[in-house]
Amino acid sequence: MSLINYLTRIQFENGAVGLLAEELKLLKASRPLIVTDLGIVRAGLLDRVIKESNLPPGTPVFDGTPENPEEGAVLVARDQYRKAGCDSIVAVGGGSSLDLAKGVALMVGHAEPLEQYAAILGGVAKITPDLPPLIAIPTTAGTGSEVGRAALITLDDGRKLGFLSPHLIPNVAICDPDLTLGLPPHLTAATGMDAVTHCIETYLSPRSNPPAEAIALDGLARAMRHILRAYRDGSDREARSEMMMASLEGGMTFQKGLGAVHGMSHALGGLKSPRLHHGTLNAVILPAVLRFNESHAQEKYRALRAAMGLPEGTDLAEAIADLSADLGLPKNLFEMGVPRECLPLMAERAMADHSTATNPRPLTVEDYRRLFEEAMK
């Protein structure tokens, strides 16, 4: 097996899920709560994880993760953790399950209300190391949450807020590309574009972190070489492995911060209706933000073109739009069902999002209004 010690302990290999019981033992944990969603259960992935990792029968499972993690689900899972006498958490699924598990870990060791720990409300310093051990097992290649310090959770009032702390980075990430072999093409595309967006936005962040920038460019190059292969042939194990590594690398670079794409997608992700997929939102919004930012990051745009294998002078926004079209993703927010009347509120929420601070070009609420309008077309 391939062990990577970077930010946290990472097991990356086909079949790595078989190491789960051993990793729990190393953490001195014996009764985890598994946090997942019904889609993972119905696809048979949870049974596979339990079987291949030799977890004991009757291991408690919370499978009520919503499409976008919500405060109510965090508290329900927290109560189940306590009632079942658990001593650790194992998250199995996409970014929603992984983020929800971080929220559960936070609320196991910290007092309510959840809101007080949000980054934009000064909550970073309030998050202490008093959290149960957490192991993250991603079943998609996109979010990078298995090595990320953030959890995005929608509060009961509809605000989708970021909870950030190095203490929220999972103790162990088990990255088994074989778990993504059955991922449908549309989810392969949407989650893959999430990884692409992470690598691009973190690279463009104005914070100085050369190692993270090198990782972001490597992840972007891997994704651009393999995303269409994984989309067209879900059984391509090399493509699946490379996309999971691209996703992992995108998560490793979160330390630099993101940008306007995530400010906008976080805002829209808090809508009750329609329910919008985060990776798809990123793919749809990214071209508009690339056009907006180019004047403030021209040297970095040249490096992005090189990493993506594009000729010098290529319009990055058009290249991303063309890639999204090849992946069968929606062309704009209108196609995703976003109601125009919500855009003024979305602009205000995007402006307040923690990702806005690290966009390479400073933003105003009016800038966000124009970006949302452009992404609607």
Image (cartoon, rainbow, N blue to C red):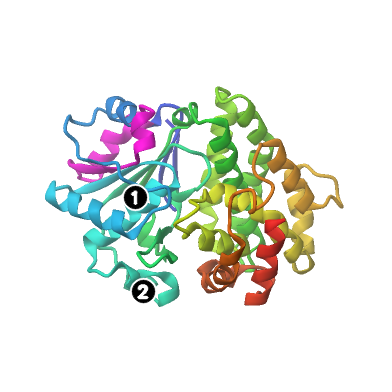
Q: Which residue is depicted at the point 77% across and 46% down?
A: 319
Please give left or right for residue 6 compared with residue 370 in the image.
left
Please give left or right for residue 157 compared with residue 198 in the image.
left
Q: Could you tell me the amino acid type at mark 1?
A: Asn
Please give left or right for residue 373 compared with residue 117 in the image.
right
**Whole-percent x and y of residue 89?**
27, 47
**In which quadrant of the rendered image does the N terminus lie?**
top left
Q: Is residue 324 magenta?
A: no
Front residue of 103/204: it is: 103
What is the secondary structure assignment of the residue under circle 2? helix
* Residue 274 vertical position relative to residue 235 in the rendered view, above or below: below
Neighbor class of circle 2 (other Cα within 10 Å; few <14, some 14-19, many 20+) is: few
N-term-proximal mark, 1 vs 2: 2
Q: Evaluate if marks 1 and 2 touch, with contact meaning CB atoms under 8 Å apart.
A: no
Q: Is residue 26 magenta?
A: yes
Q: Quadrant of residue 78?
A: bottom left
Residue tagged 2: 125
Q: Which residue is depicted at the point 72% across and 61% down?
A: 374
Neighbor class of circle 1 (other Cα within 10 Å; few <14, some 14-19, many 20+) is: many
**In which quadrant of the rendered image does the C terminus lie?**
bottom right
**Whole-percent x and y of residue 192?**
58, 41
**Whole-percent x and y of residue 330?**
65, 44
Residue tagged 1: 171
* Residue 183 vertical position relative to residue 160 in the rendered view, above or below: above
User: In the rendered image, is residue 333 in sight?
Assistant: yes
Q: Point out the stretch of residues depicted in magenta.
A: 17-45
Q: Could you tell me the amino acid type at mark 2?
A: Ala
Front residue of 301/63: it is: 63
- Cα separation, mark 1 vs mark 2, equals 19 Å
Please give left or right for residue 45 compared with residue 315 in the image.
left
What is the secondary structure assignment of the residue under circle 1? loop
